[in-house]
Image (cartoon, rainbow, N blue to C red):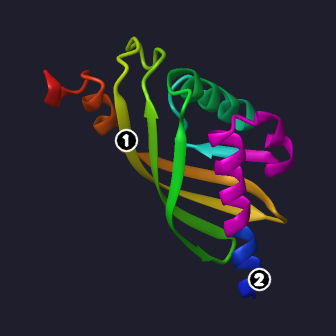
Amino acid sequence: MTTNHTLDRNKAVYRCYIQQVFNEGRVDLLDELLAPSYVYHEAPPGTSPGTEGIKQVVSMFRAAFPDLEITIDDQIAEGDQVCSRATTRGTHQGEIFGIPATGKAVTMTGMTIVRIVDGRITDSWVKNDVMRLMNQLGAGSASR
C-alpha cells in the first residue's frame, strides 16, 4: 500500500529533477535521481538510452534556450507513478532541430508520467507539444 507520505515524496523527487536538472542544468545529479536501469520511453530519435539520453536532451534544450524554465502546473500521484502537467518557457538563442536562433520567446506545454521506485526515477514517458514549439519558431506547417 502506498502512503500519502510516499506519494508526496515521489512528487518531490520529480520536482527536484525538473528544477535542478532541467532548469539549473545540473546533469551531475542524474546518477542519484535516476535508477541505473532508467528507461526513457519514446525518447527523441537519435537519443542515447538511459541517463545519457537525458543528458543529451538537457544539453540540447539548454543550448537552444539558455533561460529555459519548466514550471510544473499540476501533479497527480498514484502508486509508484507521478503524472505532471508542465509549461516550458525560454528564449530561442541557439540552434535546435536544425533551426537557427530566432531570438523568439517560446512556450511549450506537456505531460510526463514517471515511475519512481526507492526514491529514484526508473521510467519516464514524455509528451510535449513540439508542433506548437516549431510553429513559434517559424518551422511548423501552420507558419508556412
**Element assignment for label 2:** helix
Q: Position of residue 46 (x, y in %)?
A: 56, 22
- Is residue 40 at least partly visible in the picture? yes
**Element assignment for label 1:** strand
Q: The N terminus lies in which quarter of the figure?
A: bottom right
- Give, as a three-letter code, the residue at label 1: Thr
> Which of 73 and 10 lies nearest the eye of the viewer?
73
- First to last magenta residue range: 11-38
Badge 1 local density, few (<14 within 10 Å), some, or many (20+)?
A: some
Is 80 inside the magenta-drawn segment? no
Q: Residue at x 53, y 47 (%)?
A: 70
In the rendered image, the vertical position of residue 109 relative to residue 77, given as above or below? above
Residue ID for mark 2 = 5
Describe residue 72's horizontal placement relative to residue 129 as left or right: right
Is 29 inside the magenta-drawn segment? yes
> Which of 59 and 104 lies nearest the eye of the viewer?
104
> Which of 14 and 41 lies nearest the eye of the viewer?
14
Q: The C terminus lies in which quarter of the figure?
A: top left
In the rendered image, the vertical position of residue 99 relative to residue 6, given as above or below? above
Residue ID for mark 1 = 107
Q: Residue at x 67, y 68 (%)?
A: 11
Q: Residue at x 30, y 36 (%)?
A: 131
- Give, as a three-letter code, the residue at label 2: His
Q: Main secondary structure of the magenta part?
A: helix
Residue 116 in which image quadrant: bottom right
**Of pointers 1 and 2, the one earlier in the residue sequence:** 2
Q: Position of residue 99 (x, y in %)?
A: 37, 14
Which marked residue is nearer to the observer: mark 1 or mark 2?
1
